[in-house]
Image: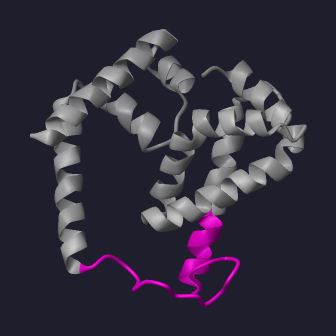
């Protein structure tokens, strides 16, 4: 998805176009979820932050200004700030920003969950390291750091479609490596 398409969808969302909102969600939710998950480190918390992020996007789309910067930067900033707000609230002893003090689950993973997650993380890191260095760095940039394909293409000095191909093939290689 290119910058112009995202900007057009945000403009339509500013007009409260539900179809545009659904399309925007379909196009950017995976990347924004990655940002939320990276900040919060808990899937449930990241899902809640994602919901809050899209509520903020719906309410504030009319504030977006196409000023030459990537619209993904604006969206990622909303997701990141929402996640950081939730993280701060959690650190202050509140599970949820809107309902302080509500504890529905025990904090942190169980020892078994921690062991499984650590094993999966080590395996994923090994699989990423097995890729060509630039491919692995591009995947980390896109899916762990929230960088746009265009930013990565510029960083690695390759055409945008080449970057998309690198990422697609890299993800296929990761899936195969992780399934071993």
Q: Residue 67 versus residue 79: which sits nearer the camera?
A: 79
Residue 144 position in % (x across, y down): 42, 44
Residue 53 position in % (x across, y down): 68, 55
Q: Is residue 162 above or below residue 55?
A: above
Q: Is the magenta stretch mostly helix, strand or loop?
A: loop
Residue 11 position in % (x across, y down): 84, 31
| Quarter of the view holding residue 120 | bottom left
Left or right relative to 133: residue 162: right
Q: Can residue 158 be seen in this view?
A: no
Confirm whether the magenta stretch covers residue 108: yes
Q: Which colour scheme is used?
A: one colour
Image quarter where the C terminus lies is: top left
Left or right relative to 35: residue 101: right
Image quarter where the N terminus lies is: top right
| Quarter of the view holding residue 138 | top left
| Quarter of the view holding residue 171 | top left
Q: In this view, does 179 lie above or below 163?
A: below
The residue positioned 46% from the left and 55% from the top of the image is 38
The residue positioned 69% from the left and 29% from the top of the image is 70
Left or right relative to 113: residue 91: right
The residue positioned 31% from the left and 76% from the top of the image is 109
Residue 95 position in % (x across, y down): 56, 81
Q: In this view, does 17 lie above or below 4?
A: below
Tell which residue pokes out farthest to the left in this image. Answer: 180
Tell which residue pokes out farthest to the front in this image. Answer: 19
Tell me the magenta residue range.
83-110
Confirm whether the magenta stretch covers residue 93: yes
């Amino acid at each position: 998805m290119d910058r112009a398409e995202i900007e057009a969808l945000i403009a339509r969302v500013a007009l409260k176009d539900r179809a545009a909102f659904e399309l925007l969600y379909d196009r950017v939710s995976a990347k924004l979820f990655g940002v939320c998950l990276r900040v919060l480190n808990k899937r449930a918390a990241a899902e809640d932050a994602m919901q809050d992020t899209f509520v903020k996007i719906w309410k504030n789309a009319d504030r977006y200004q196409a000023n030459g910067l990537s619209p993904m930067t604006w969206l990622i900033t909303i997701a990141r700030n929402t996640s950081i707000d939730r993280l701060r609230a959690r650190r202050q002893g509140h599970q949820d920003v809107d309902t302080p003090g509500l504890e529905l689950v025990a904090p942190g993973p169980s020892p078994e969950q921690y062991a499984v997650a650590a094993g999966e993380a080590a395996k994923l890191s090994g699989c990423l390291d097995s890729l060509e260095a630039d491919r692995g760095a591009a995947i980390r940039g896109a899916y762990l750091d929230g960088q746009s394909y265009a930013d990565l293409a510029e960083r690695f000095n390759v055409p945008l479609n080449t970057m998309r191909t690198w990422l697609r093939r890299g993800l296929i290689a990761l899936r195969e490596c992780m399934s071993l």
